[in-house]
Structure formats: structure tokens, C-alpha cells
Image (tube, grey):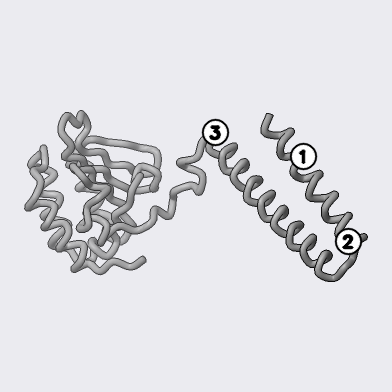
Amino acid sequence: MYVSPVKKQVFLNWFLDHYELPKREMVWLFDYMLKREELLNHIHFVFDAHLCPRSMVISVQPDEKRPFRYYKEHVVTSEVEKAFHDIRMNLQEPLYVELNFPGFRQSIEYSDVLIDNPYMPDDYYMHDDDYQVVDALLQHVTDEQYISQLKQKIDESLDAGNDEAFYHYSWLLNRQQLNESIGDD
């Protein structure tokens, strides 16, 4: 999803108006970003920015021990000056930014500039238990659909007066329901 530099600028100004950054160097960095449309074109707001090759995570949450982190490939720094230097020297490189502030997940202003993180693995939030639950749900839905189809075939065979089809589909339905009851134990 494309987000215009103007929209990003409006959001950053809103953020600065509502939250106090813990370091003055961070304010200078924001001022620098706000004045460079070329840079704003390459800034992307995402969740879980630490997964991106070049990113920064800024937090104004109370009790945050590391309010600033800058990631480049596999190197992490909390020094704003180093990040500023790299950003200034590489204006054309994508920079993924995550901002953590009170209520950021519900913020309409933030959601207006957020994009999906292109470096987020599909199963990032899933654990083994989650896969088991998903598998069980899919199996249940599949079984319910199969039972529904069998009942429809039974009705159709009764309407057609086809005793052989009726007994066949009834036998399949009984077997399916028996398997489900054994599986529930």
C-alpha cells in the first residue's frame, strides 16, 4: 500500500504534538525526516520493524528501557547519532519505522500510515498449539460439510425411490458419525 509523504508528514507532526521523545537527538532526527520528502518516500511504518533489514523502533511507552533502536542488517544500536548518519547517507534505501506509544494498536492516526510488513513470516505469530487448533477446526468443518452432503444424498435417494443409494449413503453417514463419536473420547 502506498502512503504519500504528505500523509507521513502529517502523522509525524501529530506524533510529535502528542508525545514527548525521551532524547533530544530523537527530536532532531524527526525534524530531519520531516524536512526531506525524498526520505519520507522511503520511510514505511510497520509493526515488528526489527524483522526488516533497515529499521528503527522508537518507544515513548512509560518505563521503556530502550526507547530507541536502529537495525541495519544484523547490527543494532541505541545511538541516535549513528542512525542519523546512516539515514542521511542512504536516503534512497527503504527505512521501516515502528512507533510504540500508549494505545498505538488502536490509533487511527497510526493506522492511516501503516503498511503490512513485507518481511513478516506468514507464521510469525503461530505456535505448535495454534497449528493443532487450526487443523482441528479445519477437520471439524470438513466433517460437517461431508455429513451435510451425505444427508442431502439420502434425501435425494428417498425422493427418487432408490433404496440402494439410500442404504449406501445411510451406511456412510452412520460410519462417519461413529468415527466422530470415537474421536471425541
Q: Residue at x 26, y 38 (%)?
A: 69
CB atoms of marks 1 and 3 within 8 Å: no
Label 2, label 3: how far apart the Cα atoms are: 41 Å
Please determine whether, in this image, residue 107 is positioned above or below residue 112. above
The residue pinned by badge 1 equals 178
Residue 65 at what x, y percent from top left? 20, 29
| Pointer 2 local density, CA inside 10 Å: few below 14, some 14–19, many at least 20 | some
Q: Is residue 36 left or right of residue 98?
A: left
Give the mark nearest the N terminus, 1 or 2: 2
Please determine whether, in this image, residue 111 is positioned above or below residue 58. below
Q: Residue at x 20, y 66 (%)?
A: 7
In this orientation, which residue lies closer to the viewer: 34 or 175? 175
Q: Residue at x 74, y 58 (%)?
A: 151
The residue pinned by badge 2 equals 165
Residue type of the residue flagged with mark 3: Asp
Nearest to the eye among marks 2 and 3: give it: 2
Give the mark nearest the N terminus, 2 or 3: 3
For the residue labelled by badge 2, is the local secondary structure a helix, a strand or a loop? helix
